[in-house]
Amino acid sequence: MIRVEGLRKSFATRTGRVQAVDGVSFDAADGQITGLLGPNGAGKTTILRMLYTLMSPEAGRVLVDGLDAAIEPTRVRACLGVLPDARGIYKRLTARENIAYFGALQGLDDRLIAERTARLVSALDMRDFIDRRAEGFSQGQRTKTAIARALVHAPRNVLLDEPTNGLDVMTTRSLRNFLLEQRAEGRCVLLSSHIMQEVARLCDRIVVIAHGHVVADGTPDELRESTGCANLEDAFVQVIGSDEGLFA
Amino acid sequence: MRALWIVLRKELLDAFRDRRMLLVAFVVIPLAIPLVLAGTNALSARKQTQQLEGPLELPVIGAERAPNLVAWLQSHNVKVLPAPKDVDAAVRTQERDVVLRIDEHYRDDWRAGRPASVEMIFDSSRPLASGATVSRLSGLLDGYGSTVGTLRLVARGIHPAVANPLQVGTRDVATPEARFDLSQQILPYLLLLLAFIGGMQLAIDATAGERERQSLEPLLATPVARESIISAKILATAVFSLLSIAVTLVAYRLAFVIVPSRGMDASFDLGPGGLVQLFLIILPIVLLGATVLTALAAFARSYREAQGYLPLLMFLPMIPSLVLMVAPVRTQLWMLAVPFLSQNQMIVRVLRSERIGALDWAVSLGASFAVVAVVWWIAARLYHREQLATSS
C-alpha cells in the first residue's frame, strides 16, 4: 500500500527552476496494478525516486505500508522492490550473482536467496543465461536480471519505472504475466509508462500525469466515463491536452 | 557491518575479474617500477666505478712543460690527451669532465722552487656528472705536490713532519644501511605515491563507474546505509592497493637480486620486521588515498572528470620530498603529524634501520588516521547528495 500526498519537487537548471512535480497525490492499493501514465518529462521518474527515498520531496509526504518515507527511509526501502530507470547490472558478475548480491543486501540468507532465485528464474524464464556473466546480455536479459534482483526479497510493494522500455514482444508478454502473478499474490504494484496501450491493458487503476500534475485518476472505465469518450485513447488525449508521446 | 562486508566482498570479486585492472596492479606496476629503479641504480653504480677506478681521460694544455708531472699522472691510471681547441666549450658541453692547464712559466717556477701553477677547468654546476672525476684529479695533484714537497724538505735536511702541524683523520659513523643511495631517496616517494593513488582505478570505477553504468541507483534503493556502502568501497580500494604494494615490494627486492649493483641494495635489506613497519606506516596513506579518491569520484560528474583530478593527487605525496630536498631539516615531532611528510620520514628511518619510538608511532598514526576520518566524513556527505545517483 502506497499513499502519496501533495508531493512537490523542483530542480535548478541554467534557465531557472523547473517545477518537476507540483502537488501530486494518489494511492496505490495492495492486490492492484497502478499505472502512472504520462508523456516523457511529465515527472513520473521523479515521483518514483521520491518514493524510494533517492530524492526528498520539498513538500508533501510518502507513506509505504503506513511508514513515512521521510522519517524511516531505511524501513521504507526494505518494503519496496525497485526497478529504477537506471537498471545497470554488474557485467563481471553472472545473473545469479547479481541477484544474490541484492538478496544479501536485503538481509536474506544464502538458502532463501537460492530458493527465491529459482522461483524468479522460472517465472521470468531466465534459465538460458542465469549462470552467464552479464557482459553482452541483451536488453531483455538485462531487464529480467534487474527485475529479479529488485524482487528477490519478495517485497510487499513493487515499483517499476518504464519496465517494458526496449523489450521485444515476447519479453513484454512474459513480464506482463509476471506482474499479474504479483498482483494475484496481493502485492501493490506501481509502474510508470508513457505507452497508453500497455497501461490500459495491464492496470486496474490509472494515474495520468502531465507537467507535474495529476490530471486524471481512476479505473479505465471511470476515465472513459468522466471524459465522455468511448475509447481510452481519446480520453487520454483529452485529459492531457495533446497526444504527444503517448503512443508506442 | 554485515552490509559493509557484503559490499566489500562484491567489489573485490568484481575487481579481481577485471583483467585489465589486475594486469596494471599486479604485473605492470610491480615490473616497471623496480626495473627502472634497479636499472638506474646499476647504471649509477657503473658510472661511479668508472669515474673512480677506470682510466681517467684528461686533456692537458701544455703537457710538454711538465713531463715529470705528466709521467706521474700516467703512472696513476690517467690517460693524457691533447687539449681540445675550445677548452671552455668542451667542458660546458660535457664533452670533457675536466681539463688540466699547465702554466707557461711552470718550468721556470719549478726550477726556481717557486710554486708552479696548474689549473683545473671544470663546470661546478654539474656536480653529479663530473664531481667524482674532478675530486679524483684534485687528489692526484695534491698527492704529487706533497710527494715532491716532502722530497725537497728531506733534501734540505728538514723533517717533513715540520710542514704538517696538523694531521686530519676521518671516521664515518654511518651504518651500512644508512649509506646514501638513489633507492633510499626514491623509495619513500614511490611507496607513498603507490599507497596514495594505487587504488585509483578501483575507487573511480566503484563510484563514478558504477554511476555511469547505471547500477548505483538500484544499489542506493536497497535498505543499506550509504555510510556502509561508501566504507565498503573505500576498504575494497585499500585492500586492493595494499596487495598491489606487497607484490611491488617483493618484485623490488627481487629486482636487486637479478640486477646486482654493488653496495646499492643495502638500503633494502629489510627483514620481516622492517616490512611490517613499512606496511604500518603506509596504511593510513592507503586509506587516505582510497577515501580521497572515493570522495572525488562521488563529487565528479563523470568518470572522465574524476580522472582529471589525478595529476593533482600525484603531486601531493611529492611535496614533502621536494621540501626536504630543498631544505633538509632534522626530524621534529610536529612533522610526524603532517601526512606524507610524516610517512616520508618514517620510511627513511626504517630504511636506515633506526629505532622508532612509541611516541613517534602514536603521533604519526594518530594524526594520519584523524585526517582519514575527516575526509571520510566529507566523502559520506558527498554520498548523500541527491545528484550522486541521478546526474549522468
Image (cartoon, grey):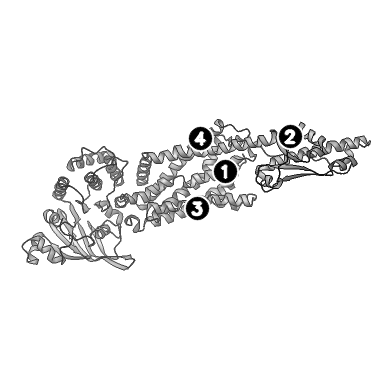
- Distance between the alpha carbons at the discs numbered 4 and 1: 16 Å
Secondary structure found at label 3: helix
Residue occupying the point 59% across, 46% down: B345
Q: Are marks 4 and 1 on the same chain?
A: yes
Mark 2–mark 1 distance (CA, rounded to whole Å): 34 Å
Q: Are marks 3 and 2 in contact (CB under 8 Å)?
A: no
Q: Position of residue B194 (x, y in %)?
A: 49, 44
Question: Do circles 3 and 2 both sit on a common chain?
Answer: yes
Which residue is more in the foreground, A61 or B123? B123
Q: Is label 2 in a helix, a strand or a loop?
A: strand
Q: Which residue is mark 4?
A: B251
Mark 2 or mark 1, whichever is nearer to me: 2
Residue flagged by tag 4: what amino acid is it?
A: Ala
Disc 1 residue crowd, few under 14, some 14–19, many 20+, Cα 10 Å: few
Q: Report the side of B339 relative to B74 (left or right).
A: left
| Mark pair 4, 3: CA separation | 32 Å
Q: Quadrant of residue B187?
A: top right
Check the residue under mark 1 and report the chain it is in.
B
Task: Give the CA distance from mark 3 to mark 2.
Answer: 60 Å
Q: Which residue is mark 2?
A: B78
Q: Residue at position x 25%, y 42% from top?
A: A137
Whether the residues at callouts 2 and 1 have beta carbons within 8 Å, the answer is no
Q: Are marks 1 and 3 in contact (CB under 8 Å)?
A: no
Q: Disc 3 sits on a residue from what chain?
A: B
Which one is earlier in the sequence, the residue at label 1 or at label 3?
Answer: 1
- Find residue B370 and report its horizontal and vertical position in percent: 50, 52
Residue to which mark 3 is pinned: B370
* Secondary element at image label 1: helix
In the image: residue A240, left or right of residue B141: left
The chain carrying label 2 is B
Could you tell which of marks 2 and 1 lies nearer the N-terminus? 2
